[in-house]
Each structure stands twice: as structure tokens, then as C-alpha cells.
Image (tube, rainbow, N blue to C red):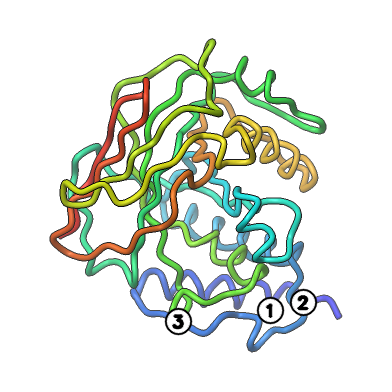
Amino acid sequence: MSLSNDTIESIAALLHDAERDVRDVVKVTDAQPDLTTERAYDVQDALRARKLARGVRLVGMKMGLTSYAKMAQMGVDTPIYGFLGSDNAVDDGAAVETSALIHPKVEAEIAFVMRDALQGPDCSVEQVLAATECLLPAIEVIDSRYENFRFDLPSVIADNTSAARYVIGSKAASADGRDLESIGVVLEKNGQVVEVGAGAAVLGNPARAVAMLVDMLHARGQSLAAGSVVLSGAITAAVAVEAGDDVQVRIDGLGSTGLRFV
């Protein structure tokens, strides 16, 4: 049975308020087991509308479940996506207040800044690279609104794929001729290397994740806007953080970015 639009709005309100009030809730499918992935994206759209209505600007998009291992673990054959609002953005090197988060974790990613809009279907890696203004190193802070970071696929889609904060570097790098598959990534916490990886961890090539995002948006009658920031997916495993932690990401040829938790 398809959930009513009133139920979709009530789920969006629950997740919106959980983030605002910094409190965790049980995954939404506990109360709404009929929530499908398609309707979960309707919840996400309703959540975005609530944020935009209170003055948040849409900055871009993010991809999740972009490793084949993660997809297998969740029993899916395609990644998922969420949106990035101006309330998620953190300046390079700035402090993030842990009191505004529930149980934050950090991941190293490559950010694409889009010069041109892209529309599906059948978006290609070549089209993504041609439409890319620049690449930047990025750290995504994920913070599920669910108890103990436990969720299923519809629940995490509805919760905007655990989006919380992100920071991108300040030195733009061209995508032209860059080997994104073998590009090396180092995630450091408090001066110690905690994770390393390569671009191929994201669907074999991070640009492929962006192409897939464009096609997924097309399937819902949407497109990727010019000027969008796109977090292409986690290259490293997520690392838990707390007040006092200093996190840095270094990516070959793209430079570094970082943030502090207070």
C-alpha cells in the first residue's frame, strides 16, 4: 500500500525536527514498513522543501553507497543520493560544533563543481568531465538521525543520506587529463593517518558516480544545475569524531582541506 502524502509530510517533519533538535529517532520503517525507496525520495524532497522554506539555499548534491561493497551490504545495485544545503557548508579550516550533531563521522571525498547543467538519461563520464568547472578535496560529515546509526535503505534515503556538514578545499584543480581512478587520498585525524584510499573506490571512477546521479535525477524529472557542488562519494571508510578532533584530507594533485570539532 502506497503511503499518503500526509504521511510523507509527517515523516519529513519528524526527520527535520530531529536534526534541528539534535535528537535521534528510530528508523522510520519501524512505524512505516510500507515505505518504498521511491516514496523515501518523496520524503527527502519534502524535507528539502521545509529547509528551503526557512531560508536554506540548495548548494548541490551528494552521492551515497558508492562502493560496491556497501551496495552489496545493503542489497542494492545502485547508489543513493541526497542534497546539500547552505546549512551543511563549513569554511575550510573552520570549527564544527559537536553540540549540534548527534554521532558524527567523517569521510574523504572528491567534490565536483559543475560549470554546466547536466540532464539525463544516459549521462556519461565524458559528459561529466566536460561539464566540470573544477575538482576540490572534500570532507563530508555524516550524522544519521537514527539511533545507533542503524537504518535500512528507505530510511536513510528519507534522512537525506545522513547529510550533516561538508568542507571543500580552496584551491581549484582542473579535471582535464586527471586520472581519477588511481588518485590517492589520505584522511588524518589529530595528525595521524587513519584511512587511505584511491578514487577507484567510488564506482571505479568518481565521475561515474556523478553521471549516475544525473540519470537518477532524470528518472524523477530533475536535473543537475550549473554551479552545483557534488560530493561524489566516500573514498575512505567513515571515522567517528568528537570534540577536540582535528581532521584533514589530502588528495594527490588536489591539495588538502580540513576542519575542527569543538
**Which disc is residue 7 wearing?**
1
For disc 3, the marked residue is: 147
Residue 97 location, x and y as percent? 21, 60
Dots 1 and 3: beta carbons under 8 Å?
no
Q: CA distance from mark 2 to mark 1?
A: 5 Å
Dot 3 or dot 2, earlier in sequence: 2
Residue at 62% across / 63% down in the picture? Answer: 157
Pick whichever, 131 or 241, lies toward us.
Answer: 241
Q: Secondary structure at mark 2?
A: loop
Image quadrant in which the C terminus is located: bottom left
With 213 as the anchor, is 36 left or right in this view? right
Quadrant for the N terminus in the image: bottom right
Measured along the vertical axis of the image, is residue 232 above or below residue 48? above
Residue type at mark 3: give it: Glu
Q: Callout 1 environment at 10 Å: few (<14), some (14 to 19), or many (20+)? A: some
Q: Which residue is under mark 2?
A: 4
Badge 2 local density, few (<14 within 10 Å), some, or many (20+)?
Answer: few
Describe residue 203's horizontal placement relative to residue 188 as left or right: right
| Element class at badge 3 | helix
Between the residue at mark 1 and the residue at mark 3, the CA separation in whole angstroms equals 21 Å
Amino acid under disc 1: Thr
Tags 2 and 1 touching, CB below 8 Å: yes
Picture residue at 77% right of the left edge, 77% below the top:
3
